[in-house]
Amino acid sequence: MLNPIRPNDGEVSEPVLSEDVASVQKQEEKLEEITESVGDADGVRAEADEDVRRPKPAARPHTPTRAEIYEHEVTHLPYRSWCKYCVYGRGVSSPHVRPDKTEKIGVTVSMDYCFMTGEEDEDPSLPGILIVWDDNYECLWALPVEHKGPVDWVVKWVVNKLDEIGYRGVAITLKSDQEPAILALKKAIAAKRTGVTTPIDSPARESQCNGAVEQAVRRWQGQLRTLKEHYEDNVGVKLPVAHPLMG
């Protein structure tokens, strides 16, 4: 019985394990492998959970070249966050989401009057500005007018602009608030155009219904402030609101 494990002539032989002991050892090794694999999987899942909520770094500010600055300062369009005049005139705290174009039906042209007020001038305001906004091409026109309402040359100017953009003979919708002056202007434009013109009036005290042209007004006012601030900074003097250059 002792011969299998007895050393012969100074040689040490390894013990011979029975089949039961060997099978138990293999099972223990497999269990360790499974445990390690489960641990690795938990670690991967933990890393995946951590990767879900990564902090979003702020955008690195762009440093414009001198050529880019010269090119931008011609019109200050489009808006650039690195331009102090754009920030002064049109900077907002957060961007506004553009409306979905798929919700638009037909061609709608919105109109409204607005004013730019001054603080230190004898004439506290510019003449009224007629803002016309086309939601189809997203274009804006601004026309200084001394009088509100259906002035002949103003009616002709609006009709010509609509014809130039491609709306000659095209059915459009003219939208505005319920101010009597602009209602009369819309009626005169509809009579002057060759295409069908459908007037729509937003409900009284419901400014959100005419929000497209109100955004256009703010855009125009911001652009005017931007150019005015740039001019005054270069010249070194304040530009009076009643100055002919403002028109």
Image (cartoon, rainbow, N blue to C red):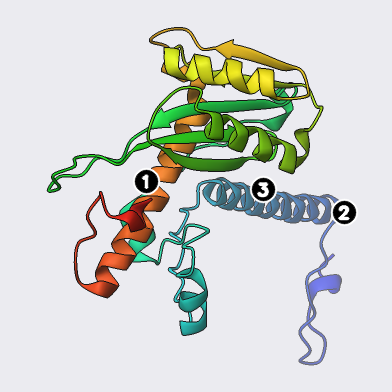
Residue 13 placed where, x, y %? 80, 80
Residue drawn at the location 48% of the way across and 41% of the way down: 143
Question: Along the horizontal axis of the image, is 247 left or right of 160?
Answer: left
Q: Which of the two residues, 34 or 144, is positioned nearer the viewer here? A: 144
Label 2 CA crowd tier, 10 Å (few <14, some 14–19, many 20+): few
Q: Tell me which label, 3 or 1, sits earlier in the chain.
A: 3
* Disc 1, SS: loop
Circle nearer the N terminus (3, 2): 2
**Front-most of residues 96 and 88:** 88
Question: Mark 1 and mark 2 in contact (Cβ < 8 Å)?
Answer: no
Nearer the observer: mark 3 or 1; the answer is 1
Q: Which quarter of the rendered picture does the N terminus lie within?
A: bottom right
Q: Kindly report which numbered mark, 3 or 2, lies closer to the viewer in this rendering.
A: 3
Residue for badge 2: 19
In this rendering, the answer to whether 35 lies above or below 182 is below
- Neighbourhood count class around disc 1 (C-alpha, 10 Å): few under 14, some 14–19, many 20 upward: few
Which residue appears farthest toward the front when viewing the image? 152
Q: Which mark is residue 92?
A: 1
Q: Quadrant of residue 119?
A: top left
Q: Secondary structure at mark 3?
A: helix
Q: Amino acid at mark 1?
A: Val
| SS class, disc 2 | helix
Q: Which residue is mark 3?
A: 38
Q: Residue at x 53, y 33 (%)?
A: 154
Q: Nearer the viewer, residue 50 or 191?
A: 191
Judged left or right of residue 247, residue 44 is right
Number of numbered labels in the structure image: 3
Which kind of residue does numbered mark 2 sit on?
Glu
